[in-house]
Image (cartoon, rainbow, N blue to C red):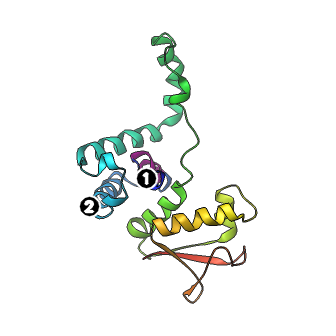
Amino acid sequence: MEELLFSALDIACIIDNFDLSERRANELINRIWNEDRSFLLANYRNNYRQWILDVRYWSHYLYDKVTFDKEFPAILSDCNDSLDDELFIEDDFNFDLFFKSIRIRILYIEESGYTRMKLRTLLSAYGYKRRSQEFVSYVKKCLNFYHIQTTLRGNVPCDVECINLDDMITFRVI
């Protein structure tokens, strides 16, 4: 379950994806600390300073990732190639970021209190065209962990296992 908790990199990715201003980013970081601390990785729950420093570090990295990655070979040559570059360059971010982003968007970014999308869009976010039992159970696990309720039009509760791929799902945090 630790992979479902918010890391500093997750929040930096969300800040970057929503292109938040510095002021809104600071408000988001503080609100998550104050209101959603139980969803933070254990090493951040009692260390506010480290939380802010790490989110800011990753935010700065993501802001100019292309330039930093271009300079990586020069850093390696300065270190006499003793560093493993696989540890530092990573484009594949957390699969769980999708649901983390939904929770953050609903609670702190959008004022509507919900977000909507088709099940087909949800599947394509993971690179799938069809539902598998593993995918459905994973989605249910994430929805339960982040306390997200799914409904169809008219606030009719729904199960991602039973609805049509082109049904519009409304996500709300309960």
Q: Amino acid at mark 1?
A: Ile
- Give the x, y percent position of residue 77: 50, 12
Q: Foreground residue, 11 or 163? A: 163
Residue at 46% over, 54% down = 14
Q: Which residue is mark 1?
A: 15
Q: Which residues are magenta?
A: 8-16
Q: Which amino acid, by three-letter code, is at mark 2?
A: Asn
Q: Is residue 9 magenta?
A: yes
The CA distance from mark 2 to mark 1 is 17 Å
Asked if labels 1 and 2 touch by Cβ distance under 8 angstroms, the answer is: no
Total count of labels: 2
| Label 1, residues with CA under 10 Å away: few <14, some 14-19, many ≥20 | many
Q: Is residue 152 above or below residue 124?
A: below
Q: Examine the image and state in which quarter residue 70 appears.
A: top right
Q: Position of residue 109 (x, y in %)?
A: 41, 65
Q: Earlier in the sequence, mark 2 or mark 1?
A: 1
Image x and y of residue 143, in percent: 52, 68
Residue 153 location, quadrant: bottom right
The dominant secondary structure in magenta is helix
Q: Is residue 32 magenta?
A: no
- Viewer-closest of 52 and 39: 39
Task: Please give the name of the residue rendered at 52% of the width and 61% of the height, measured from the top-left corner.
Answer: 99
Identify whether 133 is placed above or below 55: below
Residue 104 tag number: none
Judge left or right: residue 167 versus residue 59.
right
Label 2, residues with CA under 10 Å away: few <14, some 14-19, many ≥20 = few
Residue furthest bottom as drawn: 154
Residue that mark 2 sits on: 34
Badge 2 marks a residue whose secondary structure is helix
Q: Quadrant of the C terminus?
A: bottom left
As drawn, is 94 to the left or to the right of 103? Answer: right
Across and down, in percent, residue 35 comes to 29, 64
